[in-house]
Amino acid sequence: KSIFNAPLQELVESILDKIKLSDELGAKKSAHALANKKGKQLKLLSAILR
């Protein structure tokens, strides 16, 4: 299933779920690495929503 065929709400929820999951997986990583990863995800999200 292509993400481009998914309704926007479903796409956003999927991205937020992935961010939450990566937060859980990255909990043992350094705060700096996690913040860097979060920043990239937020840039990706804003690019999709633009």
Image (cartoon, rainbow, N blue to C red):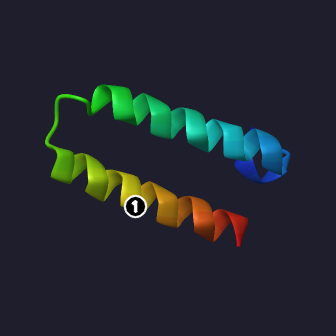
Left/right placement of residue 11 relative to residue 29 reads: right
Q: Position of residue 5 (x, y in %)?
A: 83, 49
Considering the numbered disc 1 on the image, is that residue within a helix, a strand or a loop? Answer: helix
One can see residue 49 in this view: yes
Q: Indicate the quadrant where residue 47 lies.
A: bottom right
Dot 1 corresponds to which residue? 40
Tell me which residue sits at (64%, 37%) in the image.
14
- Specify the quadrant that holds the N terminus: top right
Tell me which residue sits at (31%, 27%) in the image.
25
Tell me which residue sits at (66%, 64%) in the image.
48
One can see residue 2 in this view: no
- Specify the quadrant that holds the C terminus: bottom right
Tell me which residue sits at (44%, 29%) in the image.
21
- For the residue carrying disc 1, how many other residues have a C-alpha within 10 Å: few (<14), some (14-19), or many (20+)? few
Q: Position of residue 13 (x, y in %)?
A: 69, 38
Left/right placement of residue 9 relative to residue 39 reads: right
Seen as rendered, the residue at the extreme left is 30
User: In the rendered view, would you say 30 is above or below 41?
Assistant: above
Q: Indicate the quadrant where residue 36 lies.
A: bottom left
User: In the rendered view, would you say 44 is above or below 31?
Assistant: below
Three-letter residue code for mark 1 = Lys
Seen as rendered, the residue at the extreme front is 31
Q: Position of residue 24 (x, y in %)?
A: 35, 26
Total labels drawn: 1
Left/right placement of residue 14 relative to residue 20 reads: right
